[in-house]
Image (cartoon, grey):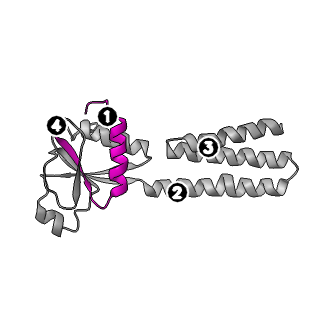
Amino acid sequence: MEIVLGIMGIVFAIGVVLSHNPMRAIIFMGAFSITMATYYYAMGAPDVAMAEATLGAVFTTFIYIVAMKHRGSIKVAYIRKEPFFYRTREGFAGSEYHLLKRFADKNAMHLEITRIAETPSHKDLQTDRSFQFDIICGGLKDNLSLPGYTPLPYHLRGFAIYVKTDSEDIYESLEDFLIGDSDEEY
């Protein structure tokens, strides 16, 4: 039994390391902790098993899940422009929406989407404190000058998603995501 538990522990540990989905990694960590708690109990250390079950399986898993819930939102401002980003009766649609949705799902994040009427002016971006978005999109060309935002070209025809300059982690993650999906047409 100890050998089986040891092998299961190794498999779950490898699952944590190799998982690309953060939520799946948390589940693997919880399974690893439960497996190790069972292993410790089988080896005659019920006190260590109880500590592992309490701290490793329950407490740590709970903390990671709460952190994931609070971590993940991307504030998106979109200009309604078919076929890039628009709303239907069923929800949002368009190539840019699906691109951002897949990115958010892959990174266990959710999109907070707000429609804006037109491309924001320099004045709006510099003076309007309520204009706090991580991404601006909606069929924008990659040659616009939007202060505080960096264009991230994603299409051969010169379209870009604009990412807030101080959101480097989102920019780099989205850029890596786009490079990984470069064989797809958006």
Residues drawn in magenta? 158-186
Disc 1 target residue? 182
Asked if residue 167 lies in the magenta stretch, the reply is yes
* Secondary structure beneath label 2: helix
Secondary structure under tag 1 reads loop
> In the rendered image, which quarter is residue 7 located in?
top right
The structure residue drawn at horizontal position 27% and vertical position 59%, both measured from the top left corner, is 165
Q: Which residue is identified by label 2?
A: 66
Give the CA distance from mark 3 to mark 2. Answer: 16 Å
For the residue labelled by badge 4, is the local secondary structure a helix, a strand or a loop?
loop
For the residues labelled 4 and 1, the Cα–Cα distance comes to 22 Å
Residue highlighted by disc 4: 82
Q: CA distance from mark 1 to mark 3?
A: 30 Å
Of the image marks 4 and 1, the number of the one nearer the N terminus:
4
Q: Is residue 70 left or right of residue 139?
A: right
x then y, percent, for residue 36: 74, 47
* Residue 177 x %, y %: 36, 41
The spot of residue 94 in percent (x, y) is 24, 36
**Considering depth in this image, is 150 or 4 the residue closer to the camera?**
150
Going by the numbered disc 3, the residue's amino acid type is: Phe
